Amino acid sequence: MQSDYLKYWRVIRYFIRAKYKISTADIEMLLFLKSEKYFGKDKFQDFNNLLSWDEGRFKRLLRDSWIEVFRKRVGRHKTIYTLSFKSKKMLNSIYKKLNGEEIPTSLSKNPLFKKNVSYSDKVYRHMIKEMNSIIKQQRHHSDE
């Protein structure tokens, strides 16, 4: 079986950015932290150094509930953080889409399908419909 997980990554990423109102760099940070389970600011900073410079990223992700405190600082033990339920839900959605789940086309689940959207949103909306059609065809062929 051919692995084309990233074929629609750009479309999936665009949808996720619009739905969750999050930047690409923040998505990349959360993808990195997903396998860490628990992390300190030092581990966060290791990967943050590779991303576009954003001094407020850690505080913003904490404030916006993408990451949360797992254990507060006690004595010499530093504060430990973890991904929030909100982050885990978003990341699971990304992986499901990469594995062939369709991107929703309803107004309530996809802001790209609202009436007054940008030209770029309309272009991506068209690609989402095309992508979903291909996914349905592939699913239909594998059922046979």
Image (cartoon, rainbow, N blue to C red):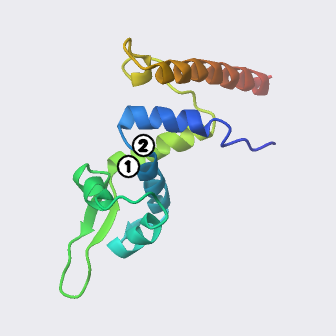
Could you tell me which residue is drawn at 34 percent across and 46 percent down?
86
Could you tell me which residue is drawn at 30 percent across and 54 percent down?
61
Q: Residues within 10 Å of mark 1 (few under 14, many from 20)?
A: many
Which residue of the protein is positioned furthest toward the bottom in this rendering?
Answer: 76
Q: Which residue is mark 1?
A: 87
Helix, strand or loop under label 1: helix
Tell me: residue 18, above or below residue 81. Answer: above
Tell me: residue 58, above or below residue 3. Answer: below
Q: Are marks 2 and 1 in contact (CB under 8 Å)?
A: yes
Which residue of the protein is positioned furthest toward the left in this rendering?
Answer: 75
Horizontal relation, residue 105 to residue 136: left or right: left
Q: Nearer the viewer, residue 73 or 8?
A: 8
Q: Nearer the viewer, residue 50 or 2?
A: 50
Q: Which residue is mark 2?
A: 90
Q: Gap in Å between the C-alphas at discs 2 and 1? A: 5 Å
Could you tell me which residue is drawn at 57 percent across and 23 percent down?
128
Q: Quadrant of the N terminus?
A: top right
Q: From this viewpoint, is residue 110 visible? A: no
Q: Which residue type does callout 1 highlight?
A: Ser
Position of residue 34 measured from the top left corner of the image (x, y, whole percent): 46, 58
Could you tell me which residue is drawn at 43 percent across and 17 percent down?
113
Q: How many marks?
A: 2
Q: Quadrant of residue 111?
A: top left
Helix, strand or loop under label 2: helix
Q: Which residue type does callout 2 highlight?
A: Met
Tell me: residue 2, above or below residue 121. Answer: below
Tell me: residue 84, above or below residue 41. Answer: above
Position of residue 54 measured from the top left corner of the image (x, y, whole percent): 35, 58
Position of residue 110 measured from the top left corner of the image (x, y, whole percent): 42, 24
